[in-house]
Image (cartoon, helix red, strand yellow):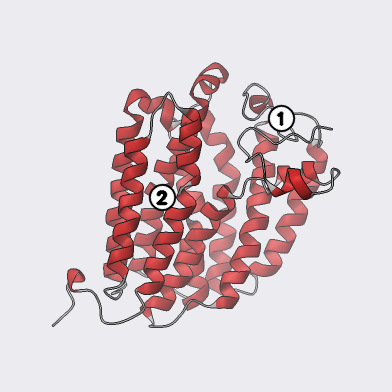
Amino acid sequence: MTTAPLPDAAPTNWVDRHAPAGLRPWLKLGRFDRPAGLWLLLLPGWQGIALAGAEQGRWPDLRLLLAFLVGSALMRAAGCAFNDIVDRDIDAKVARTASRPVASGQISVRQAWAFIVACSLVSLAILVTLGPLAIGLGVLSLALVAIYPFMKRITWWPQAWLGLTFNWGALLGFAAATGRLDAAAGLLYAGGLFWTLGYDTIYAVQDLEDDALAGVKSSARRLGDAAPRGVLVFHLLAIVLALASGAAGRLGALFLPLAGLYAIHLVVQARKLRIDDPAGALVLFRSNRDAGLILLLAIVAGHWGAPAPFFGAAP
């Protein structure tokens, strides 16, 4: 049984350094050795919770933040295991994914299904505490999760479907905090969709050659040399929609400086992207944890003071 770090995991990740050898394949199946994806799934949910609080002039609900942390970790683990079951034959042909536990035979398909069921049951126990609208949204998200692994076979834009899936937490978090949805939450979700379309295009740059050989479609392959320009467009749309969400939520003036820093972060990513530099693409992809945290802090800061003049507040 191999204990070497997977190619897209940090060599010093905690799973390979500290976890018992027998648990490592299971933790890798749930991507616990690669926390960047957990952050990217978790942060939209936290942003939705923070937006609900900011609209009401209060701090984010700590209980909900903790519930979303545990739920996101488990649902990401379940979703990754399902993706690995569906993609096991493709993964075996791609250098970056050939060592994944299911593709390499360390974990059987039946064992991976048992892992999915266990993670899903605990997540369901958390979901049923969040209120009727949140429960309904949580159930609907399962369709997005189930369809995602197949999108790379039928469309050049599986990254867009990932955006629909990964940012569902923005709606779920807002609904869990308020029992409703509004325009600000919808705009936050739409902005997250384009953010994900950008950062997952960056991620797909790592696999351009292998994906072409395996017949896997991606936005990076579709855009080719224009991928950096495409990412810039996606990220500019994400910035505009994030500002529109702040305006719809009538966030305070302190939202704007941090939202500006978020905008700079996304633009710099696009400017630095090179399609012939897969290692650099991985670094840029991982930096999106920081981008998401910056937007989260911007939303939290927006609960102070009167709406920003930029948003058309009355004098």
Against 30, is 281 above or below?
above
Q: Which residue is mark 1?
A: 99
The quarter of the image holding the N terminus is: top right
309 or 130, which is in the foreground?
Answer: 309
Q: Which residue is mark 2?
A: 193
Q: Is residue 135 left or right of residue 315?
A: right
Residue 53, x across and y down, in percent: 43, 77
Against 120, is 101 above or below?
above
Residue under the point 68% across and 24% down: 92
Q: Residue furthest left?
A: 315
Dot 2: element? helix
Q: Residues within 10 Å of mark 2 (few under 14, many from 20)?
A: many
| Real-space Cα separation, disc 1 to disc 2, in angstroms | 30 Å
Q: Earlier in the sequence, mark 1 or mark 2?
A: 1
Against 111, is 314 above or below?
below
Q: Please name the amino acid that badge 1 sits on.
A: Ser
Residue 296, x across and y down, in percent: 43, 64
The quarter of the image holding the C terminus is: bottom left
Q: Confirm whether residue 174 shows in the render.
A: no
127 or 4, which is in the foreground?
Answer: 4
Q: Please name the amino acid that badge 2 sits on.
A: Leu
Residue under the point 71% across and 30% down: 99
